Amino acid sequence: MGRFGTHVIDADGHGGDLPNWQARIPAPFQPKWQERRERIKKQFANLPGVGIKETKGTAKLNSLERPGMTDPKARLEDMDLEGIDQTIMFPGGAGEEWAGLDRDFAIALCRTLNDCRAEFTRYAPKRLMSVAKLPMIDPTAAAAELRRCVGELGMVGMVTPQHIRDKNLDDPSFDVVWRTAEDLGVAVCVHGGGQAIDQVPVGVDRWKTRLEVHAFTHPVGQMIAIMAFTVGGILHRFPKLRVAFLEAGTGWLPAWLERLDEHWELTPEQAPLIDRKPSEYFLSGRCFIGCDPDEKGVAHVVDSLGEDVVVYASDYCHWDCKFPDTVKIVNERTDLSASAKRNILEGNPRRLYAVA
């Protein structure tokens, strides 16, 4: 039980990578890793916490250097400080899914990363959990890695970007991944990925600053993903699949579902893969959206769509997170009912990840 009297499950924390995990990448791929690391530095050079060393704003500089990001003992201490009982951790999103468009490198990189993250979670497996990073450039290999990560490493889900290169997530080639997740009973988590190296940009190439790119890519990317899962028929083809759309805010969701419903009602024949309104798929109890603790739109989403949709996310320990006060902020909100808070902090994350 957390420090605020409520069991809290963090549906979206970060970290869980051991220090210098990259040294474990197989030797034949080390030159590719060094080349890739330089490209990552260049790509994210203007991001608080990575490249910017000062700001007039409230961004947390060098937040990724917090010990709890790479040390499980320190992570548990920070969880206790914040009031978190269990956390599901996400790896960084730098395009490991396609790794320089080299299938074998992508497979090796994801496998190494997952092995190291599993070592991190074994320190306290009932409290520290992880999702798997998959080589989505090869969906069959991604499905095999997901099966390994769940069966051998104890992971509770998978993470995917909002689109994979030039393909939307409803491309039939990815059905093998969704089928595997459904068979295993684990969550599919859509989480950023619009600005990773080697990604095919959707709009982000129009902007010049990290402020603009980061503000734009997350919600717009999740709109694309939600359309793929609903209108594109993924949730229809896989009726037991559980999906979360994370780190993009929540306030836009009711308007987006309403707009998709309106267009489906006007021209349903243009969505031949579904047989009901897009919102009915989303609101079937299988879809969730991650919230920032102080986001004003959360109450609107709960009022519009019900208490069973929103999941709490600490976003530990990113440059824009509210550590160490995220649980406190949710707990002290006056615009959410007690039952809504319980669902956001525990009930909905527990259903999403099927954690004990």
Image (spheres, rainbow, N blue to C red):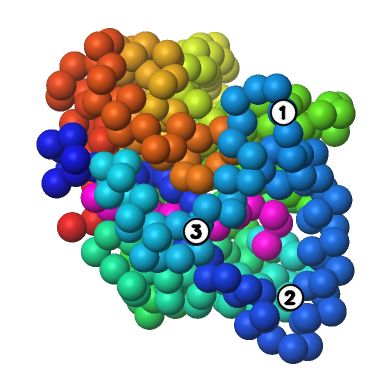
Amino acid under label 3? Answer: Pro
Amino acid under label 1? Answer: Thr
For discs 2 and 3, the disc positioned in front in the rendered view: 3
**Lower sequence index among marks 2 and 3:** 3
Q: Position of residue 347 (x, y in %)?
A: 20, 39
Whole-Å distance between the Cαs marked 1 and 3? 22 Å
Q: What's the magenta region?
A: 85-96
The answer to whether one can see residue 291 in this image is yes
Residue 177 lies in the magenta-colored region: no
> What residue is shown at x 33% (from left), y 58% (from top)?
76
Between residue 317 and residue 74, name the one nearer to us: 74
> What residue is shown at x 69% (from left), y 32% (from top)?
214
The answer to whether one can see residue 313 in this image is no
Residue 94 lies in the magenta-colored region: yes
State left or right for residue 312 relative to residue 97. Answer: left
Between residue 29 and residue 98, name the one nearer to us: 29
**Lower sequence index among marks 1 and 3:** 1
Amino acid under label 2? Answer: Phe
For discs 2 and 1, the disc positioned in front in the rendered view: 1
Q: Which residue is mark 3?
A: 67
Packing grade of label 2 (10 A; few <14, some 14-19, many >=20) is: many
Q: Position of residue 17 (x, y in %)?
A: 53, 65
Q: Which residue is mark 2?
A: 105
Asked if the residue at tag 3 contacts the one at tag 2, i.e. Cβ–Cβ closer than 8 Å, the answer is: no
State left or right for residue 81 relative to residue 153. Answer: left
Q: Which residue is mark 1?
A: 55
Between residue 106 and residue 332, name the one nearer to us: 332
Packing grade of label 1 (10 A; few <14, some 14-19, many >=20) is: few
Element carrying mark 2: helix
Whole-Å distance between the Cαs marked 2 and 1? 36 Å
Q: Position of residue 126 (x, y in %)?
A: 24, 64
